[in-house]
Amino acid sequence: MMWQAQAQDLYLPRDIQAAYKKGTRSPDGRPGKNYWENHGHYTISITAMPPDRAVKGVEQITYYNNSPDTLKRLNMKLILNIHRPGAARFSGANDDYLTDGVQIDKFVINGTAKDWDNKAAAGTNRMVKLPQPLLPHDSIKLDISWHFDVSKESGREGMIDPTTFYLAYFYPRVSVYDDYNGWDTLAFLDAQEFYNDFNDYTLNVTVPKNYIVWATGILQNPNKVLQPKYIKRLEESMKTDSTVHIATVGDLAKKDITTQNDVNTWTWKASNVTDMAVGISDHYDWDAASTVVDDATGRRASMQSAFQDTAKDFHNAVRAGVHALNWLSHNWPGVPYPFPKMTSFQGFADMEYPMMVNDSHNDDIAFSQFVQDHEIAHTYFPFYMGINESRYAFMDEGWATTFELLIGSTEIGKERMTKLYKGFRITDWINDPATEEDLPIITPSSETRYAYGNNSYGKPSLSYFALKDMLGDDLFKKALHTYMDNWNGKHPMPWDYFNSMNSGSGQNLNWFFNNWFFTNYYIDLDLQNVSKGNGGYNLSIHNIGGYAVPFDVKLTYADGTSESVHQTPAVWQLNQRQISVFVKTGKEVKSVVLDGDIFMDADVSNNTWTAK
């Protein structure tokens, strides 16, 4: 309870206050003694017969109500209804994007058929009244049959080409019911991302012969769907860091990779994951390798890739992915990759899924690696921790953006990666004076449109780097691991992050969190004056923008030498608007420049002082 008083320093929404009172969350950042989350067992069977775009599915869901509440209704998520004409979405839709959405053919609750009107159930949420209330600590069984057409225009999911599909969000699911907000009923508008429970899945995918399937989870029946030669190559890849070409363009031409039944059913299993995704193709190359992600146990994780043979960058995907899995496990965040595998699938989305990324082709191999690194880093946020991306996207996108700079610096060099990070993540924000760009990061993502990208990616990433700079790597990692250990497999809110970092660091960082997350600040330092004092120089610095940023004081001396003195964000703790910095030196200073590096300044014209 040591952090309870400090937690009150930050704005605390009434729903989070109520969670503390109920004991589901704790002011020290940990789940409370009464924390709970609901859970589902999903057995899903789908049939896809490309180039026919029709996909048929049946599923059995056992949904466990671990809450103390009696549930009279279930909210179903029907994400593919975003393709329906007239659906609410943040941007327009081409004809190739439009479909009839999810068409429910049968909906049975505990053996009782439920009437279903597909015209009425046209949104991405559908509340279903239960025949009998679902009591606390009881379960309910759902049997659902449905079908949909894969959209011709592929985004996060859809048709990559006539015989290559990427299927995501393809099954009706029970939405999250949580301790602070109840049912998650936010509509999917094709911009903000997702919020899912941790479930157990068995997935059966039936496709024609000569089609290979890649999916979340572990393939259960390779002997039934693959020929022995290719099984051997797959098994070999599980033991080596070197890329194994499981199926090449030459192999694909022979049409001898899969079992030669008319159709094959590929079965996958995954436990305690938040979603399933599937890639299907009859002409994609298949590469794989693996790497040790946990030194303590020697556990290896598989890195696989599926791609068109003409995509040079994807021929590098497995090598790059092996590096990412290993580096992320051993450096930042420094938590062993938690899943048995990762697959990089060539599509158009640049989007993450549990154990899968759907990335677009780019002629610049280094940029492709940059994107793949980002998507693989999402393994930790939102999948290792069940982030509510729909409301607080900075809790996952900000971290993936942070990790991409850290790992990228080891791949293409710090200077080149810093330039890429600044150009791709920071420049557009800091040079945009629009009012919307100054909305506090804590603003729910569901309530932002224009500022969504910068509030989710660049600005929060800078806050994480600023905190890392202030605490130092060791203490920052200790605090980060405290947060991750507290909320692995659970649903953290921003205040759980703030409080966990306080507890893990042993410091009250609320002044810093308030500065970065709850204000409409930006970055603009003004070097007002430099005056010679006893044994050095005094710098008077006004923080016009307000953010507590680190910066370097770069001094050029009259003798032609230069020096750089670093200042951490701690200099702003007592006064976030005005500080005096003393630089000890016996030399005559010719000029002084304030340089924030990645903490780009909105107005650099007032960052320089030159001696008269």
Image: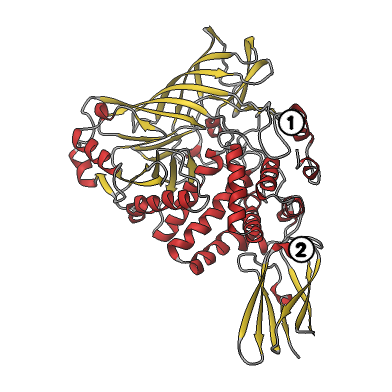
- What is the crowding at mark 2: few (fewer than 14 residues within 10 Å), some, or many (at least 20)? many
Tell me the residue that label 2 is attached to.
572
Which of the colour schemes (rainbow, by chain, secondary structure, one colour) is used?
Answer: secondary structure
The residue sitting at 65% across, 21% down in the picture is 67
Q: CA distance from mark 1 to mark 2?
A: 32 Å
The residue sitting at 69% across, 81% down in the picture is 592
Q: Is residue 385 left or right of residue 530?
A: left
> Would you say the residues marked 1 and 2 are in contact, meaning their CB atoms lie under 8 Å apart?
no
Q: Secondary structure at mark 1?
A: helix
**From the viewer's perspective, is residue 403 above or below residue 106?**
below
Identify the image quadrant of residue 68: top right
The residue sitting at 54% across, 50% down in the picture is 400
Tell me the residue that label 1 is attached to.
19
Q: Nearer the viewer, residue 111 or 549?
A: 549
Residue 399 image label: none
Q: Nearer the viewer, residue 2 or 381?
A: 2
Q: Secondary structure at mark 2?
A: helix
Image quarter (top left, top right, bottom left or bottom right) of the N terminus = top right
Residue 471, horizontal then vertical, whole percent: 65, 58
Residue 185, horizontal then vertical, whole percent: 66, 29
**From the viewer's perspective, is residue 218 above or below residue 143?**
below
Q: Earlier in the sequence, mark 1 or mark 2?
A: 1
- Give the amino acid at mark 2: Trp
Q: Is residue 604 left or right of residue 143?
A: right
- Give the amino acid at mark 1: Ala
